Amino acid sequence: MAIAAVDTDRKTLRLLHPASRLVLGGLLLWAGLVKVGDRQGMALAIDSYQLLPGAMVRPLAAALPWVEVALGIFLILGLFVRFSAIATGLLLVAFLVGMAQAKARGLAIDCGCFGGGGPGQGVSWFDIVRDLVLMGVAGLVLLLPRSPWELDALLAEDEDPEEM
């Protein structure tokens, strides 16, 4: 009986890792692709948080969507998984700090998470909780045993994917 429970737990973990990667990667890819073609809207969204000097807004508006797209693709494909999970976690920390300070200051802005941004109703608790949950998912991707269903497993010659 105990052996069956351990085996079931291993199977669950083996499925949880790729599922977590796909959810996190899919959301990042979607968020980045929505913003990639709207550099002006992205600059407005970033500037609305009133955190960065004006000289940093445009370069960040140009780069951030591509960073999200790249991390999303890496996570979906299972490429550079540990790096991608850490980078995504750090990105989410930055987003959370921005949203929390905007909420605390009562700034009437949209989060800009999936495009748009600028003046709006204000950052919602849903936005903050969603990013906290996504941070947890990034932590799962980082800490769970690796899955054989990732490109990293194919590139790692010294590891047997069946043992992951």
Image (cartoon, rainbow, N blue to C red):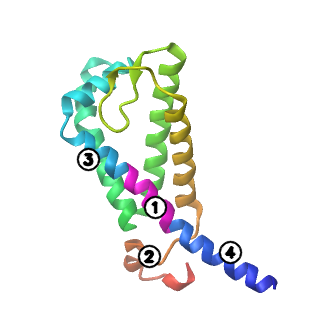
Question: Which picture quadrant has residue 95?
Answer: top left
Label 2 is placed on what type of residue? Answer: Trp
Of 1 and 140, nearer the camera is 1
Could you tell me which residue is drawn at 52 percent across and 34 percent down?
A: 126
Of 54 and 121, nearer the camera is 121
Q: Which mark is residue 9?
A: 4
Label 4 is placed on what type of residue? Answer: Asp
Up/down of 80 relative to 135, above or below: below
Question: How far apart, in angstroms, are the residues tagged by discs 3 and 4?
Answer: 36 Å
The magenta region covers 18-27
The chief SS type of the magenta part is: helix
Could you tell me which residue is drawn at 27 percent across and 18 percent down?
A: 54
Give the mark, 1 or 4, whose residue is nearer the N terminus: 4
Give the mark, 3 or 1, whose residue is nearer the N terminus: 1
Q: Label 1 belongs to which residue? A: 21
* Within-10-Å neighbours for mark 3: few <14, some 14–19, many 20+: some
Residue 145: x %, y % from top left: 57, 70
Question: How far apart, in angstroms, are the residues tagged by discs 1 and 2?
Answer: 10 Å
* Within-10-Å neighbours for mark 4: few <14, some 14–19, many 20+: few
Quadrant housing the N terminus: bottom right
Label 3 is placed on what type of residue? Answer: Leu
Circles 1 and 4, Cβ within 8 Å, touching? The answer is: no
Q: Quick check: 14 left or right of 102?
A: right
Residue 74: x %, y % from top left: 35, 60
Q: Label 2 belongs to which residue? A: 149
Question: How far apart, in angstroms, are the residues tagged by discs 3 and 1?
Answer: 18 Å
Could you tell me which residue is drawn at 20 percent across and 33 percent down?
A: 39
Mark 2 or 3, closer to the camera? 3
